[in-house]
Amino acid sequence: MEYETKARAAAPDEFDVPVSESRRTFLKMAAVTGAVAVSARKALADGDIGFYAKDLSDEKLVDMYRTILKIRWHERTQADQMLTNPGYRGYNHFYAGQEAVATGVCAALRNTGPFEQIDLAYSSHRPSGHAIAKGVDIPKMVAENDFRATGLNGGYAAEMHLSDPSVGFIGADGMIGPSMPIASGSAFAFRARGSDQVAVVFGGDGTYATPHFHSTLNNAKLLDLPLIYVLENNLYHQYAHYSYSCPHTNIADAAAAYGIPSRVVDGQDVVQVFNAAKEAVDRARAGGGPSFIEAKTYRYYNHWGAPGATAGELGAFGYDPLAITSFRPEREVRAWMQRDPVDIARNILVNWQVLDETAAQDMETEIKAEIEQAFVWASDQPLCNPEDGLKNVFADGAVPARQFG
């Protein structure tokens, strides 16, 4: 099925399907109705939901739901730490509200096995969700974000430079855009050595305005690279609406201009994201070149940290001193929260009779406790020593002139 970008009017939500409906019936109904409403403003999206998810095992579906919950409770727990714990040194560009994007994409990837066989994922400003979806060790990531010596990267990376090559999460980047050409370099390496691996890069709507965005898409198409660009359009470049720098309602139109198959999906619905990612991954593995997925989504917290948020509550609704204003209408935030990725994923699994409401609630309680324990464990880990600041900067011993060897 060829990708295409369509501007289609969003239809009312159709997630309240009777329990008796089968997965196939549910998906067909959603495809017909174009059930892709993502906000009160009816952001445009491609409503073709596809049928890949109907073949997923119950175990896989539950695992995807667990991943969404892990991301959500990591973000909420860390936000509470930032708001209530004066001794906490961590920070984050929170991913809450966007969980279905990372989860749906990474569920379509090869995440375990030798490094020479797993798919690689590159992140940008909101890496914690991507990292968890790719399978990093959460307690070690929590320790890393608090600059602990036993963290995922020894306390050197913190949130903006998290990485774990063992699961193919190559890392985040503190700048807007550099991860894109680096990811395309990995894709070129896969193609050069005949591997069927795939490289995925996550970028926000703000990446459109960078030269990296366009050069990466141009080269990916020219070289038919196995690269999937996942653009998470959460509407805001830090504190400005994306329309200030992008002339397109759908940024995917820009990818189509390079001749790259593109799709716009409801980023709040993990099933839609998974189906688009699965098709893109299959195309890349078969030598069909790059794909572009724009996921319409929304971040529940402000651009950075937890200003405007209240401990114990989800989301930020108040004044952000970094923006010198409350730059998003509270009604807009609450409208998006009505289509919460956690709720949508849970409702789908209940409607498909994979879980019942009690089991779903028990799972969330279990994962919340698991994440809380990760923060307790991390808080007991040793802090980095200042004298270790130059470690890993210079090589020890003699270094051969590699270019002559």
Image (cartoon, grey):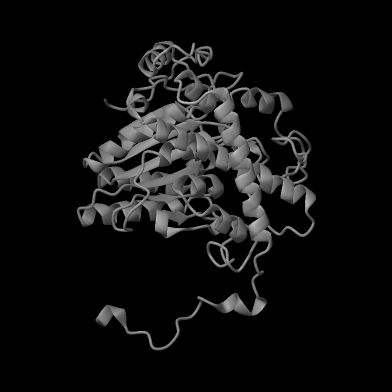
- Left of 404 or right of it: where is 249? right
Residue for point 64% across, 27% down: 337
Nearest the viewer among 149 and 66 is: 66
Residue 397 location in percent, x, y? 42, 88
- Can I make out residue 237 in this image? no
Q: How many marks?
A: 0
As rendered, which of 370 and 401 lies closer to the eye?
A: 370
Query: Does residue 27 show up?
Result: yes
Residue at the far bottom in the pictured view: 398
173 shown above or below 99: below
Residue visible at 48% across and 58% down?
163
Q: Quadrant of the N terminus?
A: top left
Q: Please identify the quarter of the rendering in which residue 129 is found.
A: top right
- How far across and how far down the image is residue 53, in percent? 37, 27
Q: Residue, x 35% and y 30% (percent of image)?
A: 56
Quadrant of image for the C terminus: bottom left
Quadrant of the image occupied by residue 226: top left
Q: Nearer the viewer, residue 397 or 116?
A: 116
Q: Is 142 displayed left or right of 118 in the figure?
A: right
Instruction: List x then y, in percent, for residue 373.
Output: 64, 51
